[in-house]
Amino acid sequence: MDLPADQQLLFRDLSEKIDRQEGEEPLARVAGEVLRSLLRRQGDAEFRTAIQDALTEGLAGRTLAEQKTLCRQVVVLVIQKRPEVALAWQALHGKAVEPPPLRRAADVLPPPPPEPEVPAPPVRPPWEFAAAEAAVAAHLTAVLRRRLEVFALPPQGFPTAAYRHEQPFFLFAPEFVELAANLLTGPLLTMCRDPLERRLYRGMTAAVMADSERLAGFLAGKRSDLTVVLGERLTKLATFHRAAEDKLAAARRDDAGGPGIKEVEVPVTRPRVIRVLGVAFTLGQQTEMRRKRIKLPSANQIEPEEMEALELIAAWRDESAHAGIDLPSACDFQFLRTLLEFEAGRFKQAVEDLTQLAAQGSTSRLYLLERVGDIDRSWPNTLADVMVLMLFARLADGGFGFRALYDVCMGSALDAGAQGRMRPFIQREVARRPRDLAFQLREALRRRADVKTVEAATRLLVEAWQVMAPARFQHELEAGLTVLAAFPMVFSGEPDEAPLCQVGHLLYEALAKNAKDAEMIVSHVLRVYAPVVARRGGK
């Protein structure tokens, strides 16, 4: 534990307070009090919210002893990072960034280490077609931006069955365009220099480059060549990537064979990176590809091309995670080729037709599911999933709700593994519902929303437990319960702490016992919450 001496005493006091708790709810309440006492300055609000959300997610699926350990780790993190966050907030809001009073050793940031002297790299002669490659990169980014506009969604209401906490579905996030362009116009164009030089760059003479209209016409005429070259390279990378993953899986299943040891990229858990006001810290875990020494049978030797594909996709996923975008495993090289080649206009029209059909009150759910089956036969399963998720986002509160989305997922296959292959995006979205809908209700309570809003959010949450099979989604349902159990941490110290925490307790008790009577649960929640709104003059 790297803390100054006076802060170690503070940590020991807070640790003893945490250790005395005998249940999840008391622990959550004390954790909230501790965070509020440590992060009580004006610039701490965003940091405190990020810590609370990350801690809430981290508590899921842990024993009480493990939860206490996690809370102690969070206390250390907060003590270490709060001076840095405070200085970042002062700089962001134009405050005078002065050293705080020397009351605590932890408030004093150590001076930065001197920059090491790095010898200048040797000067390389400029590449002959660097300007042409830059022009192609700009053209490719513009084309990709136009194509991905078909996935744009109108603003969603609140509450909604399609609510997402923190991270939107990656294709619906504006940041994804830049992330995809970084990969395609960076490493991929570099890999394709030889064929692109023959097909494009040599024709981009100085005269063509000097005239913007002529350059635009040339690139438009060569778009098919560019797509073919990039598509072939993406297919090769996808093949190498799949082969490497199959070899790694085989190596983990069968330890027999040659005794060779090799460093390879394998999926492992790593700390989750959170950024607040430009300050980065880690809390929780997520999966990434990391170099690790494992035994590989001779038949499972990772080839250089396969290693290159593993490292490239791992670096891209890491970049996306730092940008706040959670890429599913199905968003791979093959899916990027699909985004370059699919018929965007026909896709957009298919989404509009399906939306209009679902919006009609006379359309039965069975008929709508049959039309979804037609989509599966006409489009790759990834794009079919995206189309259904767009329909869900648009009509989640009427026409195509969560039950319909669940039916599409569960009707694709019997076991979870086959469902994941058939519904690579929808299965993840269904699994998120308990957690995200619990966060939505918490957000409604945090806003002190009107009674109708809280009632609707409660009904949507209960619907997840009514629809989802406990045997199949036990972990996901427990994650939603953990959010409810953490209400005391979030609302600690607020004037309405008692009734808001009671709402979480009522829902936790009812849903943990698999109670599915929505009317009874909603009436109990509103009986507790209505006086809160009434005191504020609302309805």
Image (cartoon, grey):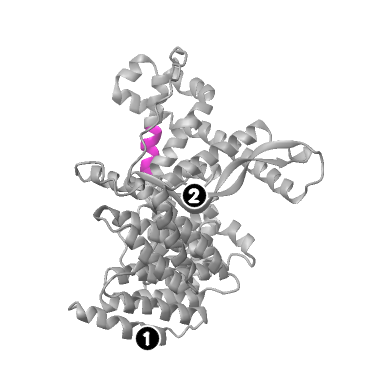
Amino acid type, callout 1: His
Is 377 displayed left or right of 95 in the figure?
right
Three-letter code for the amino acid on which mark 2 is drawn: Met
Give the answer, above or below, for where 521 lies relative to 191: below
- Mark 2–mark 1 contact, CB under 8 Å? no
> What residue span does the magenta drawing correspond to?
139-147
Total numbered labels? 2
Who is closer to the viewer here, 444 or 269?
Answer: 269
Residue 15: x %, y % from top left = 46, 62
Above or below, 225 relative to 466: above
Circle nearer the viewer, 2 or 1 = 2
Label 2 crowding class (10 Å Cα cut-off): few <14, some 14-19, many 20+?
few
- Mark 1 burial class by Cα count in 10 Å: few <14, some 14-19, many 20+: some
**Going by the image, does 263 lie left or right of 79?**
right
Please, what is the dominant secondary structure of the magenta stretch? helix
Point 73% across, 37% down: residue: 261
Label for residue 1?
A: 2
Decide which of 341, 67 is in the foreground and name it. Answer: 67
* Residue 140 on the magenta span: yes
x 39%, y 55%: residue: 349
* Residue pointed to by mark 1: 524
Query: What's the distance in space between the residues labelled 2 and 1, CA to CA?
Result: 45 Å
State the image coordinates of residue 447 (x, y, percent, origin top left): 27, 68
Q: Is residue 314 visible?
A: yes
Name the image quarter holding the C terminus: bottom left
